[in-house]
Amino acid sequence: MLHANGMKFGLCMAILVATTACAPKAQLTPSIAGGGPDEFSISPAKALEAPTNFASLPVPTPGGANLTDATPKSDAIVALGGRAPTASGRDGGIVTYASRYGVAPNIRGELSKSDERFLKMKTAKPAFPWTKNKYERAYRRLALDPWAEQARLIALGVLVPSAPPKP
């Protein structure tokens, strides 16, 4: 009787271990992330105060200055531990060069639609659905091998400050 109970317990434990070993990894992928709000669009660094007359408030300008945040981008950089940018205009040349072909005002929406089309085109039902996630299957050919890239850069004489971590 005692031996049979021990066998049942051992069998139950083996089944439990086997089923938990097959559980999917908790991964944060773009398909899980969703289209929620941008975490950095609101940074309450200063106390909010109610105005005396709500009708006199200016029209909201997302990403721009307002009564509470006169310099929202600088305040966000400081809140995240960075240094507030100076108004020297040193990066003006870089910005001008990067935007020489124009700047898309709806780049996030366009990129999201483009990525959705690419995922539909590149992913089919896998034979074994537990092997890779949809996003990884679609972008596998575009992945960069960090060790081969490091060797290539060293061969070109580029100083590489650190090696990529081993998996």
Image: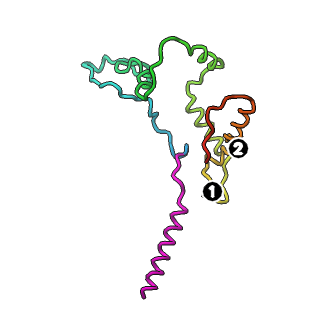
Q: Nearer the viewer, residue 113 or 28?
A: 28
- The secondary element bearing badge 1 is classed as loop
**Quick check: 53 left or right of 122?**
left
- The secondary element bearing badge 2 is classed as helix
Which residue is disc 2 drawn over?
141
Whole-angstrom CA distance, mark 1 to mark 2, is: 16 Å
Q: Quadrant of residue 154?
A: top right
Where are the magenta residues, as a range?
A: 1-28
Residue lying at the far right in this picture: please name it.
Answer: 155
Which residue is disc 1 drawn over?
131
| In the depicted structure, whether residue 129 falls above or below residue 143 | below
- Residue 23: x and y, percent? 53, 60
- Residue 6: x and y, percent? 45, 81
Report the residue at 56% width, 24% height from top: 105
Report the residue at 53% width, 12% height from top: 89
| In the depicted structure, whether residue 122 falls above or below residue 91 | below
